[in-house]
Image (cartoon, grey):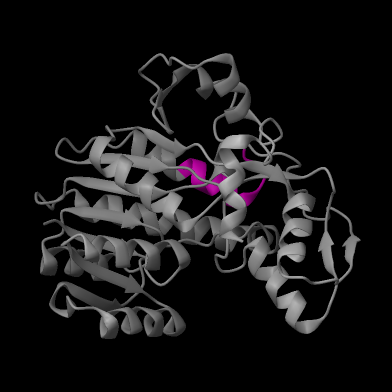
């Protein structure tokens, strides 16, 4: 049994990890600053047969003293840092706010874990937008990866996980479409060429467990999942829901990337494949095939209709 702290535990990733890790016999401390998020966590606790191993704390990762108190109170072994401002649109409108919150929150964790000898690993939830950051969100996530990579705390491994868009997560493409269907309003896409890496909540759980069990200090881990045109996701989802709401094309007014990358053209030479997972470490030469390099450096490479990814549609 491990004692695991999950920050931002009321978000899509945090909730999924809380339920899974609790089911595996671990002791979980879930923290969040959102009242709605806390309500979701309390619902998990009410339904759990392991209430005594699930602790919920109302607090903010921007408060270093709060984090230190929680780490010491529960003698945490593993920190999974999910809390962040994550929407590109938020960073576009409030860049200073996003940069401040994301950087200070992770810096607080780095500062307080230094004196906690019982902590073994810190897992940072990053983003594919960190690979070739063209937004405040992506840039802030990349900065956090660098902070962890260069941390010099002998007893702690800092490991980052990078992933793309989670189906049915809060504010995700499918979440937006579902709301548009209910409201009977058109769906707008900024550019019909856009492609994205897509994954399920289970993919994130698998990636997190891989990082916990196999990650070394300074690693950035990712998982092989489908990549697809956003327009194909929209039309496929509407067809599955038997909806005929219109699709409109707007302007890419927030300068969002047309295609994403899981690793950039410099990192790719230091990435190795391990089953369905990919691991970057700046000190280790990689072993990728040409196909893997093309897939990892552009979401435009691997279409969703590839045979291995047919089951992806079941997640709709």
Q: Establish if 21 lies above or below 195.
A: below
Q: Position of residue 108 (x, y in %)?
A: 32, 57
Residue at 38% across / 68% down in the picture? Answer: 15
- Quadrant location, the C terminus: bottom right
- x and y percentages locating residue 271 in the rendered image: 45, 23
- State which quadrant residue 96 falls in: bottom right
Query: Is 29 situated above or below 301?
Result: below
Residue for point 79% across, 52% down: 231
Residue 63 is left or right of residue 161, and the answer is left
Depth order, front residue of 66/89: 89
In what quadrant of the picture does the N terminus appear? Answer: bottom left
The answer to whether residue 83 is above or below residue 214 is: below
Of the pair 41 and 85, the residue shown nearer to us: 41
Residue at image location 64% in from the left, 58% down from the top: 91
**Front residue (pair 238, 257):** 238
Residue 109 location (% of width, % of height): 29, 55
- In this view, 95 is above or below 292: below
Magenta stretch: includes residue 225:
no
Residue range in magenta is 133-143
């Amino acid at each position: 049994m491990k004692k695991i702290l999950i920050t931002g535990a009321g978000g899509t990733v945090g909730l999924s990890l809380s339920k899974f890790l609790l089911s595996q016999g671990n002791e979980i401390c879930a923290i969040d600053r959102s009242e709605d998020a806390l309500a979701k966590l309390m619902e998990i606790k009410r339904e759990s047969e392991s209430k005594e191993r699930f602790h919920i704390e109302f607090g903010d990762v921007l408060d270093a003293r709060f984090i230190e108190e929680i780490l010491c109170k529960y003698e945490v072994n593993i920190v999974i840092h999910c809390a962040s401002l994550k929407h590109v649109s938020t960073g576009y409108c409030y860049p200073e706010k996003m940069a401040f919150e994301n950087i200070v929150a992770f810096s607080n964790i780095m500062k307080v874990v230094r004196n906690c000898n019982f902590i073994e690993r810190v897992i940072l939830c990053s983003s594919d937008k960190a690979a070739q950051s063209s937004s405040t969100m992506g840039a802030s996530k990349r900065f956090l990866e660098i902070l962890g990579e260069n941390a010099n705390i002998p007893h702690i491994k800092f490991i980052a996980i990078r992933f793309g868009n989670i189906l049915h997560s809060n504010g995700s493409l499918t979440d937006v479409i579902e709301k548009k269907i209910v409201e009977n309003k058109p769906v707008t896409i900024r550019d019909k060429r856009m492609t994205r890496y897509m994954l399920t909540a289970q993919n994130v759980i698998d990636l997190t467990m891989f990082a916990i069990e196999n990650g070394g200090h300074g690693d950035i881990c990712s998982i092989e999942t489908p990549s697809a045109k956003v327009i194909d996701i929209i039309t496929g989802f509407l067809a599955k829901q038997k909806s005929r709401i219109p699709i409109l094309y707007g302007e890419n007014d927030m300068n969002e990337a047309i295609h994403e990358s899981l690793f950039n053209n410099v990192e790719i030479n230091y990435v190795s494949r391990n089953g369905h997972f990919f691991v970057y470490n700046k000190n280790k030469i990689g072993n990728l095939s040409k196909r893997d390099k093309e897939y990892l450096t552009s979401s435009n490479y691997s279409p969703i209709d590839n045979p291995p990814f047919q089951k992806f549609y079941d997640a709709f």
